[in-house]
Structures are given as structure tokens and as C-alpha cells.
Image (cartoon, rainbow, N blue to C red):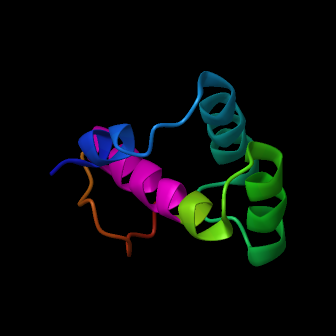
Amino acid sequence: MSASKTMEFMKLSEDQIKVLENSFNRDGKHPDGATLMLIAAECGLSVEDTLKWFKLRNAQWREAEGLPAKLGSVLD
């Protein structure tokens, strides 16, 4: 299943997606633990769900860039 299909199952509101996307673009694709906790609190999500979203969104970004979906490239 693709990352975008998996993300659809998370059932996030437009406001949650907006906060997550802004954080992804502003704070980076791999937020540290403290930043992740702040984003989760702002979205009303668990840290685990927020981390899952970032992993899926990063895979989606990598696929769009023509990179392997798995982490490990110097371009991450």
C-alpha cells in the first residue's frame, strides 16, 4: 500500500493536516523528540501517531522526488 493510501486511513482533519504539513516544511522531515511532542500536542494526536505521519509523509516526499521510499539517502 502506498504512503498516501495509508495516510488516508489516519482520518485527520484539515486543520491537523495543515499543522503537520507546515511543520514538515518548516521544521524538517525528521523532527526531534521535543519538536514532535509539541506538534502532537498542537494537533491533538499521540506522539506515536505524529511520528507515523512524518514517516509516511517522508516516504511520500521521497517517492515524489524519485528517490527510494526508505530512509538513508544523503538527500533526506
**Where is residue 68 drawn, in percent x and y?**
23, 60
Residue 76 visible somewhere in the drawing: no
Q: In this picture, is 35 found above or below 22?
A: below
For the record, the magenta segment spans 52-65
Q: How many marks?
A: 0
Name the residue located 69 percent from the left edge and 65 percent from the top edge: 31
Q: Quadrant of residue 37?
A: bottom right
**Where is residue 11 drawn, in percent x and y?**
46, 37
Residue 20 visible somewhere in the drawing: yes
Q: In this picture, is 46 found above or below 8?
A: below
For this view, does 30 lie left or right of residue 76?
right
For this view, does 76 lie left or right of residue 3?
right
Name the residue located 69 percent from the left edge and 26 percent from the top edge: 15
For this view, does 70 lie left or right of residue 21?
left
For this view, does 18 lie left or right of residue 63?
right
Q: Quadrant of residue 26?
A: top right
What is the residue that sits farthest to the top in this orientation?
14
Residue 54 lies in the magenta stretch? yes
Query: 53 or 44: nearer the eye?
Result: 44
User: What kind of secondary structure does the magenta stretch mostly adopt?
Assistant: helix
Residue 57 lies in the magenta stretch? yes
Name the residue located 55 percent from the left edge and 61 percent from the top edge: 49
Query: 25 or 18: nearer the eye?
Result: 18
**Where is residue 57 drawn, in percent x and y?**
45, 48
